[in-house]
Image: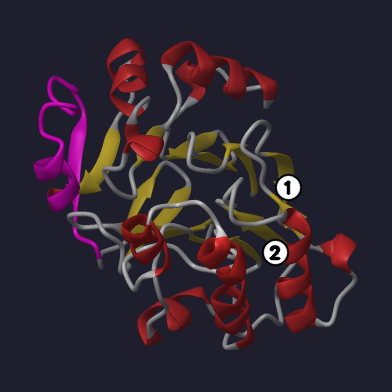
């Protein structure tokens, strides 16, 4: 089992998971040609995708989903709320599947466990991906933690964890007050310390990879995010990686 990122941030997101010959793309917030180029960087063509799973309807997560799905006949999985919120965007996709936010399903060899999260969207979810032995947990685009989130993410072999902003940088930055309230609110995005606290509450005994994701260009730095997460684990800062907007991150093998 391995995973990689097409890019992570407010300008577009996409995470690729592979088990055997099955490949699932979680979200796609890039234009069609950009998506193809980013997949090619990872040695993958759209025709090799087994499906696309969607977390929520914000543009940086869905702007490329329907284009890829229609062009290449790729199946898409999403919640009813996400579909209802962007019915036009997802129209005429031939293989569209509505999911229950609590019910696991499979796409080829990949086990997919959605779970609900607090975010300012219609019915947002995040996902755990597995192969029967190993688990990759993903948590981005969430304003606060819940006991269910932490129970779901415990004992993962790899984690992609949002570190969107530094609280002081957000408070002292040039965002309008209303945007600061949204980003820092219970239905916005996690700051570094919130992410560190979530990590501290998890069983990390199996953790092989930890990647900070969805960092704000204006309100965070990779150094601050890495320091917060590595401080919890007591590990060298070099052990914690950061997903970038431009390049995401290359393939990571879960052994």
Q: Residue at x 51, y 51 (%)?
A: 174
Q: For residue 94, which numbered disc appears in the image?
A: none
Whether the magenta-drawn stretch holds residue 82 is answered as yes
Q: Is residue 55 left or right of residue 128?
A: left
Q: Is residue 98 left or right of residue 19?
A: left
Classed neighbour count for the residue bearing mark 1: other residues with Cα under 10 Å, few (<14), some (14–19), many (≥20): some
Q: Residue at x 63, y 86 (%)?
A: 200
- Mark 2 vs mark 1: give the one in front: 2
Pointer 1: what residue?
252
Task: Where is residue 115? Give x, y as percent.
Answer: 33, 66
**Labels 2 and 1: the sequence-earlier one:** 2
Q: Residue at x 33, y 24 (%)?
A: 74
Say above or below: 196 vs 252. Answer: below
Contact check, label 2 and label 1, Cβ < 8 Å: no
Residue 124 occupies which quadrant of the picture?
bottom left
**Residue range highlighted in magenta:** 81-101
Whether the magenta-drawn stretch holds residue 102 is answered as no
Q: Nearer the viewer, residue 142 or 73?
A: 142
Query: Regarding mark 1 in the picture, which secondary structure is present there?
Result: strand
Q: Can residue 201 be seen at all in this image of the molecule? A: yes
Q: Can residue 136 be seen at all in this image of the molecule? A: no
Say above or below: 251 vs 120. Answer: above
Task: Where is residue 105? Give x, y as percent.
Answer: 31, 55
Pointer 2: what residue?
225
Task: Where is residue 170? Give x, y as percent.
Answer: 53, 62
């Amino acid at each position: 089992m391995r995973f990689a990122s097409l890019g992570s941030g407010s300008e577009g997101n996409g995470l690729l998971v592979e088990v055997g010959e099955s490949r699932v793309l979680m979200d796609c917030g890039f234009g069609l040609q950009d998506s193809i180029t980013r997949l090619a960087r990872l040695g993958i063509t759209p025709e090799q995708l087994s499906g696309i799973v969607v977390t929520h309807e914000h543009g940086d997560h869905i702007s490329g989903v329907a284009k890829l799905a229609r062009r290449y006949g790729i199946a898409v999985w999403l919640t009813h709320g996400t579909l209802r919120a962007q019915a036009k965007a997802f129209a005429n996709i031939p293989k569209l599947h509505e999911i229950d936010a609590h019910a696991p399903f499979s796409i080829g060899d990949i086990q997919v466990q959605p779970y609900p999260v607090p975010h300012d969207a219609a019915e947002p979810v995040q996902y755990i991906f597995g192969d029967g032995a190993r688990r990759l947990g993903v948590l981005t685009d969430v304003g606060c933690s819940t006991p269910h989130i932490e129970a779901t993410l415990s004992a993962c072999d790899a984690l992609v964890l949002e570190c969107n902003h530094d609280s002081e940088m957000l408070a002292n930055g040039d965002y309008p007050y209303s945007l600061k309230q949204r980003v820092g609110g219970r239905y916005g995005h996690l700051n570094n310390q919130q992410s560190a606290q979530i990590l501290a509450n998890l069983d990390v005994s199996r953790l092989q990879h930890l990647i900070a994701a969805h960092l704000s260009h204006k309100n965070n730095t990779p150094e601050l995010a890495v320091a917060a997460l590595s401080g919890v684990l007591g590990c060298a800062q070099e052990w914690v990686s950061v997903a970038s907007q431009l390049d995401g991150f290359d393939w990571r093998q879960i052994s």
